[in-house]
């Protein structure tokens, strides 16, 4: 971790959680994984406060723990995860574009609280939405629940790992120093069957007419919260990797729209949407999709004929971009999206854009030339790029000084 | 017993006649004749006389002496050269020979010295002499501006010396290249525009947005912006720079031999494209273009909190 990154993490922790959490968190980033006692000694804060700070950090998935041999539990902070806090607004905005205000608030609540049960989320979101609505209208729990289910189905929220049920035949073993959490792959997006009935409650503001009403309401609310919810113990968190996957898909669709036309980008978007859940995020290719399937899944209102779709797919597969590939002929033609190639092309385009904006279009020409041809002599650079020798030399040395190009002495 | 050795004495051949016969033979075999051939033709001449005749012809400059893998060859020299060389001495002929051999790439004066083993002063005198007689000329090489190469007067210098169509008098014509660059790009862009607007089915749209290198070449020639004649390879180098600019993409398709513009059964097609991403985030914020990026840190003289560029940018 670089000094700048550590400083940034420290500032983020301070802004979101306060001084004490900041001190503990920064200490952990600097020193790696440490047991509890060492943290207490190292930061000079009391054991109680360290415990509370660690609770907050673990709740937000910023710190994890591990049981080492001899039963010592060590805590480790994840700097990259802390830096993701910067992206929270982007995640919330994405949820808003996909699932409107309800989705936005659900994701916001989950991000701000780390982990929550479904019922708690639903209630809170319904209350918040009700406040923004006109007088007399309330948000129904059922609507919020259905949005929550949709978020879970598309993997944007996931269940947190739990303590597994102890096996029946286990003797009375002493409990381990720290629980080991795990979760079954197929349970991760399973929404518990809750019967949440109710409506959002509007919080009375002070200048509202019924001044005496809040008092009887408060004891009633506390009485409500004493009831154990049926989904106690099942906590949910936001699935950040899924959001990153969404951003990746968006960039690919935009790239296709820039290079080709709107219809091609819609087809690619459909293909990516179909592979959202079936393809893991690190896979080089999506699952093969047949042209018939794609035709059926096109968004309603996009009335292009099957023939035209086939033509577009052939064009996409033949394009020098190589984002789409043809993997077979069954079902009208099987097509995959070449994810690794797409990401590599986007990365290269980003680099070229930086060189172009920072150093000028002639430097960008030389940069692209060397990228494509791998090794070139100075004379060859001048000839291919058609730049006069003096200027070419100048630009090559400028790129060399910024470490964008490296020099290799060849054997003559 | 006195044996009268009657040697069949061949008639004393006239040296001039021998020479003429040799020249006739050379004309018959323009690639050169060996000593054996001359011997076969004129068996009655002794080796000595033959050698004398050949030497005379060589010194007169009417024959060339070449070494081949079978032995020595004698070849007739072109008559125009023999006319030119009248009045020149052997050294000049030697130097002239070396320059002629260098063809249209020319040869540097130092190389002439190595090949002929003549001292520098002699070489320079001979070169001045030949230049004044308009037999050779000096051409400045574009690779090293101080170097002069010599070649025969009537030869066109090779591209590697003059730099080809892009150099005029040793100067790389950047504006010319720029203009061509823009013209080619405009041509391809307008072709892509018309294809896009035609709203036909996507296959036809895409195929009509391509232009082969031959088409671009014809367009540029018809524009008439170039005083120098440009070949299709020249246009292809210009189109390659457009590819390195990220404005154009190229595909190679197999074309039947005989289709206009195909080279070795392939044809290169070019199409104007737009970049796949917008300018990236880092360079849209002031930090990406900041000249003092490396000196900026919190608490220093240049820091994010007192950054002038940042303040300006945020005041939109």
Image (cartoon, helix red, strand yellow):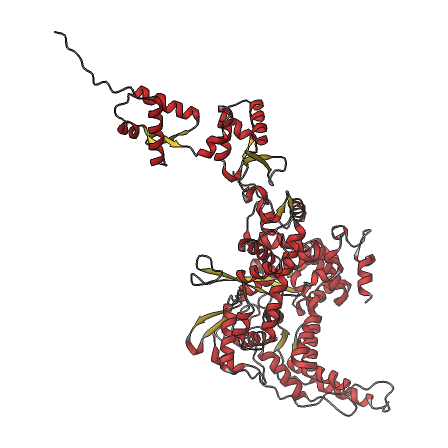
Q: In which quarter of the image is the N terminus of chain B?
A: top left
Q: In this view, does B308 lie to the left or right of B135?
A: right
Q: Can residue A375 be seen in this view?
A: yes
| Percent of width and height locating residue A30 | 68, 55
Q: Can residue A261 be seen in this view?
A: no
Query: Count of labels shown?
Result: 0
Q: Quadrant of the C terminus of chain B?
A: bottom right
Which residue occupies the extreme left position in the image? B1
Q: Is residue A387 left or right of residue B154?
A: right
| Percent of width and height locating residue A371 | 58, 54
B306 vs A85, nearest the viewer: B306
- The image quadrant that residue A332 belongs to is bottom left
Q: In this view, does B83 lie above or below A187?
A: above
- The image quadrant that residue A47 belongs to is bottom right
A367 vs B230, nearest the viewer: B230
Query: Who's the residue at 44% across and 59% down the image?
Result: B265
| Percent of width and height locating residue A307 | 49, 80
Query: Who's the residue at 62% across and 46% down the image?
Result: B167
| Percent of width and height locating residue B255 | 45, 63
A52 vs B161, nearest the viewer: B161
Which residue occupies the extreme bottom position in the image? A136
């Amino acid at each position: 971790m670089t000094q700048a990154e550590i400083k940034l993490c420290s500032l983020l922790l301070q802004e979101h959680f306060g001084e004490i959490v900041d001190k503990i968190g920064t200490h952990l980033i600097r020193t790696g994984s440490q047991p509890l006692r060492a943290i207490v000694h190292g930061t000079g804060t009391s054991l109680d406060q360290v415990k509370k700070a660690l609770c907050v950090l673990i709740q937000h998935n910023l710190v994890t723990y591990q049981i080492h041999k001899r039963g010592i539990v060590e805590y480790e902070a994840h700097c990259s995860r802390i830096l993701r806090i910067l992206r929270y607004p982007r995640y919330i905005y994405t949820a808003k574009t996909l699932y409107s205000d309800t989705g936005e608030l659900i994701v916001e609540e989950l991000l701000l609280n780390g982990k929550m049960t479904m019922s708690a989320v639903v209630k809170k979101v319904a209350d918040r939405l009700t406040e923004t609505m006109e007088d007399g209208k309330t948000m129904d729990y059922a609507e919020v629940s259905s949005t929550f289910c949709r978020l879970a189905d598309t993997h944007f929220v996931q269940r947190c790992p739990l303590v597994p049920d102890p096996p029946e035949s286990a003797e009375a073993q002493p409990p381990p120093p720290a629980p080991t959490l795990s979760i079954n792959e197929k349970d991760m997006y399973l929404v518990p069957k809750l019967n949440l009935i109710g409506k959002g409650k509007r919080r009375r503001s002070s200048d509202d007419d019924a001044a005496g009403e809040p008092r009887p309401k408060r004891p009633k609310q506390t009485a409500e919260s004493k009831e154990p919810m049926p989904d106690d113990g099942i906590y949910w968190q936001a699935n950040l990797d899924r959001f990153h996957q969404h951003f990746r898909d968006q960039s690919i669709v935009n790239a296709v729209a820039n290079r080709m036309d709107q219809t091609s980008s819609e087809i690619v978007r459909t293909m990516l949407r179909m592979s959202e859940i079936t393809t893991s995020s690190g896979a080089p290719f999506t699952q093969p999709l047949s042209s018939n399937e794609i035709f059926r899944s096109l968004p309603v209102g996009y009335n292009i004929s099957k023939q035209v779709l086939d033509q577009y797919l052939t064009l996409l597969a033949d394009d020098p971009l190589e984002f789409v590939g043809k993997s077979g002929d069954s079902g009208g033609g099987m097509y995959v999206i070449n994810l690794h190639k797409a990401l590599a092309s986007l990365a290269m385009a980003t680099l070229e854009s930086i060189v172009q904006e920072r150093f000028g279009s002639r430097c960008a020409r030389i940069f692209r030339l060397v990228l494509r041809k791998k090794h070139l002599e100075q004379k060859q650079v001048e000839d291919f790029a058609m730049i006069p020798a003096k200027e070419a030399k100048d630009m090559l040395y400028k790129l060399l000084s910024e470490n964008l190009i490296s020099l290799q002495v060849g054997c003559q | 017993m006195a044996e009268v050795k009657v040697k069949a004495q061949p008639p004393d051949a006239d040296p001039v006649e021998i020479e003429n016969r040799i020249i006739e033979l050379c004309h018959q075999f323009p690639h050169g004749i060996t000593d054996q051939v001359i011997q076969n033709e004129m068996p009655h001449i002794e080796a000595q006389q033959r050698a004398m005749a050949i030497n005379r012809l060589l010194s007169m400059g009417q024959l060339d002496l070449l070494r081949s893998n079978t032995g020595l060859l004698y070849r007739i020299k072109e008559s125009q050269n023999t006319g030119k060389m009248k009045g020149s001495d052997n050294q000049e002929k030697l130097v002239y020979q070396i320059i002629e051999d260098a063809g249209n790439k020319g040869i540097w004066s130092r190389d002439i010295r190595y090949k002929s083993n003549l001292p520098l002063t002699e070489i320079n005198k001979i070169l001045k002499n030949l230049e004044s007689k308009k037999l050779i000329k000096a051409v400045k090489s574009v690779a090293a501006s101080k170097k002069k190469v010599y070649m025969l007067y009537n030869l066109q210098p090779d591209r590697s010396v003059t730099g080809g169509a892009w150099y005029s008098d040793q100067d790389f014509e950047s504006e010319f290249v720029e203009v061509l660059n823009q013209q080619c790009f405009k041509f391809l862009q307008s072709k892509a525009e018309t294809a896009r607007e035609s709203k036909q089915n996507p296959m036809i749209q895409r195929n009509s947005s391509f232009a082969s290198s031959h088409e671009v070449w014809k367009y540029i020639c018809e524009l008439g912006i170039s005083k120098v004649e440009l070949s299709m390879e020249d246009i292809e180098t210009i189109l390659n720079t457009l590819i390195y600019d990220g404005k154009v993409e190229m595909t190679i398709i197999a074309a039947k031999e005989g289709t206009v513009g195909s080279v070795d059964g392939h044809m290169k097609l070019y199409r104007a494209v737009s970049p796949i991403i917008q300018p990236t985030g880092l360079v849209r914020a002031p930090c990406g273009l900041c000249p003092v990026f490396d000196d900026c840190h919190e608490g220093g003289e240049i820091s994010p909190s007192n950054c002038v560029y940042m303040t300006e940018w945020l005041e939109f």
